[in-house]
Each structure stands twice: as C-alpha cells, then as structure tokens.
Image: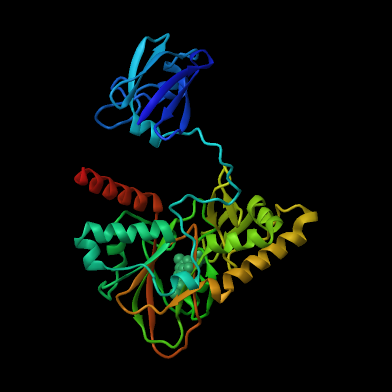
Amino acid sequence: MLTHALIGDEGKTIELGWQGGRRTRFHAMWLRDNALDDKTRSAGNGQRLVTILDIPAETRIGAAAIKGGALEVSFVPEGKTVSFPAQWLSANAYDRDELREPGWTGDIIQRWTKATMQNSVPRASYKAAFHGRGVLREWLSAVRTYGFAVMDGLPAESGALCKVSDLFGYIRETNYGRWFEVRAEVNPNNLAYTNLGLQAHTDNPYRDPVPTLQILACIENTVEGGESSVVDGFAAAAALQAENPEGFRLLSSCPARFEYAGSSGVRLQAKRPMIELGPDGELICIRFNNRSLAPVVDVPFADMDAYYAAYRRFAELIEDPAFEVTFKLQPGQAFIVDNTRVMHARKAFSGTGKRWLQGCYADKDGLLSTLAAIEHSFKEAAE
Ligand code: NM2
Ligand code: OGA
Ligand code: ZN
C-alpha cells in the first residue's frame, strides 16, 4: 500500500512511502525505461519495443500521483503518462542499503551438510512427477534450493535418463554424445569409464560454458562398492571462506585452467576460477576436478604457495565425511546435480558383478524456466 510519492532532484527521482514506514526511491530514467504501457512493451509477448535511445536523456518526472493502488507518473519532455501497480513497484524496488559479502547467495539457496541432508534427500518417483505438476514442482524446486535430487521408478533400460530431462528441458549434447555409458571399459578415454574411485568433482570444468546440470541413471549395479556421493560445493566454499578468507579470495579471484584431451580430435580448455563470483560478489559456480585441472599459470608467483594451500584445504573440506551424502544407486534410480554447485563422487568398485550407469548433461536455465512457469500457473490458478 503506497502512502506518498515525493518528487526529488528536480524530477530525476521519486521517493515512495509504504504503509509500515518503508521508503523506496526510483529514478525517472529507470521508471521510463520500465514503463508497462503497450507502446513501450508488446502486450502480446512482453518484450520491449523501444531502445534506450528512444528515451530522451533529459527525462524527468513532471507529475506523480497515487491512484487506486498504483503510481501514475507523467514524464517530460515526452508528455507521457504511465501507471505502475504498487505491487510491481514493491517487487522491483532496488533501493536497498544492505551490504553483501563476497560469496553471498540468494535466499532460495540453502546450503547443506551430511547432518542436515543424509536423512532427507529430495526424491520423487518418475510416475508421480510425470503425472503430477505439484510433484514435479517440488522436485525441481529441490534442485534449485539444494542443487540435487534423486528420482526413482524409472525403467532400468538404456535411454531412460532422457525421460528425466524431458520433464523440464533439453539435453546438452557434447563430444561424449547425447548421453554416455558409464561403465568400466578397456582403453577408456576418460577415467570415469573405469572401476576407479572418483574424488568428488564437478563435470567438464574444461568446457565454457560448463554444462549446468548432470543426470546419472542406473541400469545395473551388482558390484561391491560403486556407491555415489554428493557434496554441497557452496557449503564447502563457505566453510573455506570462514576459516581462511584469503584462501577463498585467491581461489575466487585467480583463474585456474582446465583441460581434457583424452580422445583424438578433442582439446577442450577453459580458464576459470575454482570458485567463481559474479560481478556483485554472488557465488555462482564451483569448478573442481582433480583429473582435469591443467597447469595453473594465472596466480602471481608470490601467491602460489597460499593458492595451493587453499586448494588443498578446499579439497580436505570436500572430502570431509561431514559434508558428504552417500547412497548406492539401484537399477531404475537416477540423480540430478546442479553441476555449478554440487559435486558428485563414486567409490571404487570390484571386478565381480556389473555396474552400468548412463549420464547426460542438461542446463539449469531450462529447468528454472519450467519451474517458474509451473509456479506462475499455480499462482494464477489460486487467484
Ligand atoms: N564423462 C562421464 O568431466 C569429466 O571429465 C568427468 C565425464 C566422461 C562424460 C567425466
Ligand atoms: C561421471 C561420474 C560417477 C559414477 O560419469 O561423471 O562422475 O558413479 N560418474 O560412475
Ligand atoms: Zn562426474
């Protein structure tokens, strides 16, 4: 509920008062650019019809009034009057003064450890998710909040993992194929295709952009060992930052190098930090993979000792059982990880029995889009 609108800075800004005492300022230029009228945005698809150059640089607010739960603003020199719903203004307010520490994440992200996660692994049956939008919403929402989820009740057959990606988006095809067989091979082109244990890692850090989701589905698993585990990289990074801020700073500000050149005709290379922050310090991506780390050459000589100490400590935290959630995939089960956040590992397995997994990559933008669309439709239905 708006209580007042006060034009300031000779019309360059406006201060809005809200019931309860909150105040939020807006700029005339910002409001004009975000006008909701059908000359500014297409009524059909919501896309903006004008460019910044169509808006006069000297744009000011000439007059403003609160009218029935909306703010009405007249812009000069255009002489254009636009109405902004109060709810829209509240949802899009940018006038905040809280300072965010490097490594911050949004409220939707919840970090986890073994203690908080082992007995509450997010899980859905494929049938229930396929037939029920509510179940699918919960499952996708768990991927957004925790960075992983398990799905069971899939057919234990080749290609079943595509049913999982079909629920929300599209497979990202790579040099490994649309999907790949994960089983012990003779002359493997990747250590994943052996019976060796794999340290917790994110996949394909040598790719830019990295695949942001990975799905691993189990068709057969009668070996001894071969358990899967997942580790919240955001939780491990926060632990590193808490005990060694300088180490966190080095891993997040110096690029690492990653490379894969295990099969002929392929030389994938990327130059990215192990802990990536966005321009506003938001923690956005973990890249961690001992098999694919290339010589790191972008750390100042004077910092290399400290860089390696931080890398070691990060690895210790990632291997700390307190951060690790473990399960053994059964035929017909799959799990999905946010490959920008949650690391996955597997224990070594024996030569007797058979272990056959299939994996594929997909992308989080599509998953988040499907989730947002379901949430939007549920909200509309409730209104
Ligand atoms: N595979 C399973 O990122 C990696 O190199 C991990 C990827 C071969 C597609 C393994
Ligand atoms: C992979 C991988 C784990 C497993 O293929 O990327 O990490 O359980 N595999 O085999
Ligand atoms: Zn992997």
Residue 269 occupies quadrant: bottom right
The residue closer to the viewer here, 341 or 120, is 120
Q: Where on the picture, by quarter, is residue 117? A: bottom left
Position above or below: 342 against 223: above
Pick the front one: 97 or 297: 97
View extreme (front): residue: 20
Which percent across, then down, holds residue 125?
Answer: 26, 69
Residue 294 visible? The answer is no
Asked if one can make out residue 269 in the rendered structure from this viewpoint, the answer is yes
Q: Is residue 133 left or right of residue 141?
A: left
Q: Position of residue 146 (x, y in %)?
A: 43, 61
- Residue 119 is situated, as x and y percent measured from the top left of the image, at 41, 75
Say which quadrant the N terminus sits in. Answer: top left
Residue depicted at x 51% and y 60%: 204
Q: Residue at x 30, y 27 (%)?
A: 69
**On the rendered structure, is 26 left or right of 139?**
right
